[in-house]
Structure formats: structure tokens, C-alpha cells
Image: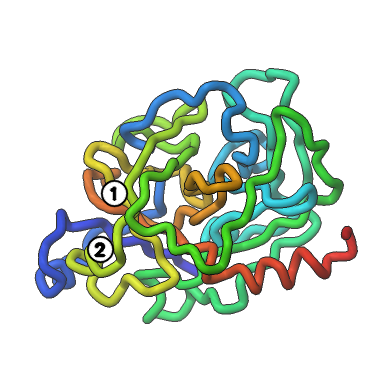
Amino acid sequence: MQIIILSFLCFLPAFLAAENFEKDVLLPRISGGEDVYPYDFPWQTSIQYHTGYHFCGGALIDAYWVLTAAHCMDNQQPNQIRVVLGEHTLSVTEETEQYRNISRIIVNPFFNGARPEFNYFLPYDLALLELTTPVNLNYYVKPISLPDQNLSYSKRVCIVTGWGKTGVNADGSDILQMAEINTLDNNVCRYTWGYYIYYGNICVYTYGVTPCQGDSGGPLVCLDTKGYVLAGISSWGDVDCGDHPSIYTRITENLAWIHDVIDNDGHH
């Protein structure tokens, strides 16, 4: 299955942007971020091959479960990959890391990137990774809270994190990056993306900040009355890591599926 991600077009009117939709494609990738203070985001997950190569992010939502993007799991088998929690600098063993293998990859059943009409907006771009053994919850490794069903998290200042590229010609970051970013009303995002934006998306944009390659599957977290909550998972964005909005999968639209899986997993 070939996953196609569109580049953004600087808020061109939708009918003009549509002419160029198929020209620049790639997986999402943080450009414009800064180093995270170590372990400020203890749910942040690095999804890796067993060689240690980081290729996607994720969010720990339970001692047994990591949530990531479905497109990150394209052609992956559980025995090919692992997750790392308690990570800050990828190249350094900090003695806070916890490595876990994967027993199951469960892709949202409504995600189908193989259908041509879906190749440009990846609806329901979520996958759950079941860990073979639970992580040990501590200061360095903690799950992120899921949001309340009735909250949209539009028009907010939230936070994105990841080890992705810091620019189109840059390497992935060795140190976990973070950036504050604005969440947009979907109607505003449609001025650029037209009908490729649907109710299951959250658009994010702040001048100079863009999730980049390697940030796919990573969390968008917003501050709520109960602390940080998981508002979105990185889905697609600009091939050039340019100064344009990025798209996250909205967690509130997927809560029923998430709870159906993790509440019936036999671990609780």
C-alpha cells in the first residue's frame, strides 16, 4: 500500500490548491521546535526497528498500549518493530528507557489508505500497538490522558513533540523536540485543503513551526482541567516541512474504538 501525503499550498483558495494536490507527496515529518526539558512528556514514544532506527512517534495511553498513526504501520509486522519509552536523546543510553516488543498491531477498521479516493487525506489514521509486557509506570514513563468526548480542541494553543526532521534538508533530531502550535477551525483549513479536511481532522498551524518527517504518529497534546490530554495524532503534512498547516487525527472522533479495544484486552 502506498501512502500519499500532500504538500500544503500557502492558503491558496481551494480550487487553486486542488490543481497541485498530487505534485508534492511524502509522510509527515518538528521544524521550528526546541529541545524538550528531559522527560516533560513521559508518554512520548519512539517506534523503531530492532536496529534502533526511529521511524515514527506514538503516545502511551495505557501500560499495555501505544497509539500511533495507521500509515506508520504500513507493511509492518509486530515482530519487526519495538517501542521505546522514557527516551530523550536517541543516541544516548540514559538508563531511563524501557524497550517493549509488540504483540499486536490493531489498525482502525475505518482506515483504508489503499483506496484511491482516500490517498490524499487518510481518514481514521490511527493504530493501537499492544505491548508484550506492560511498561513500568514512573517519573519517566506515564500515559497521557484521553480527552472528553465533547471537547473539540479547536482554536487552542497546544503542543507537538517528536524526533522528526528539523527542516526539509536536515536530519532527524537526536533530542526530543517540542513546539507550541495553534489549532485551527476546520473551515479555515479548508481554504487550503478543500474537502480533504473532514470532521475527523485537527488542523494545526503556527508561523515557523511544522511537524516534519519522523514526527508521524506523534502526539498533539492540549492543556485541560485534568492536565495534558491527547487531542490528536500526527497524520500528514507538507513534503518540504514548509510554513503551512499540518493535519492530525482527532482523538475525540475515535474514542469509542479506542475504548472498545483496550477495555476488552484481557489486561484490565
Q: Amino acid at mark 2?
A: Cys
Image side of residue 107 versus residue 101, left or right? left
Q: Considering the image in quadrants, where does the C terminus appear?
A: bottom right
Image side of residue 207 versus residue 25, left or right? left
Quadrant hosting residue 27: bottom left
Q: CA distance from mark 1 to mark 2?
A: 9 Å
Is residue 183 or residue 169 the one in the foreground?
183
Is residue 138 or residue 65 the one in the foreground?
138
* Tag 1 secondary structure: strand
Earlier in the chain: of badge 1 and badge 2, it is: 2
Q: Which residue is mark 1?
A: 205
128 in relation to 57, above or below: below
Q: Are marks 1 and 2 in contact (CB under 8 Å)?
A: yes
For residue 189, the mark is 2
- Tell me if residue 163 can be seen: yes
Quadrant hosting residue 110: bottom right
Is residue 97 or residue 219 the one in the foreground?
219
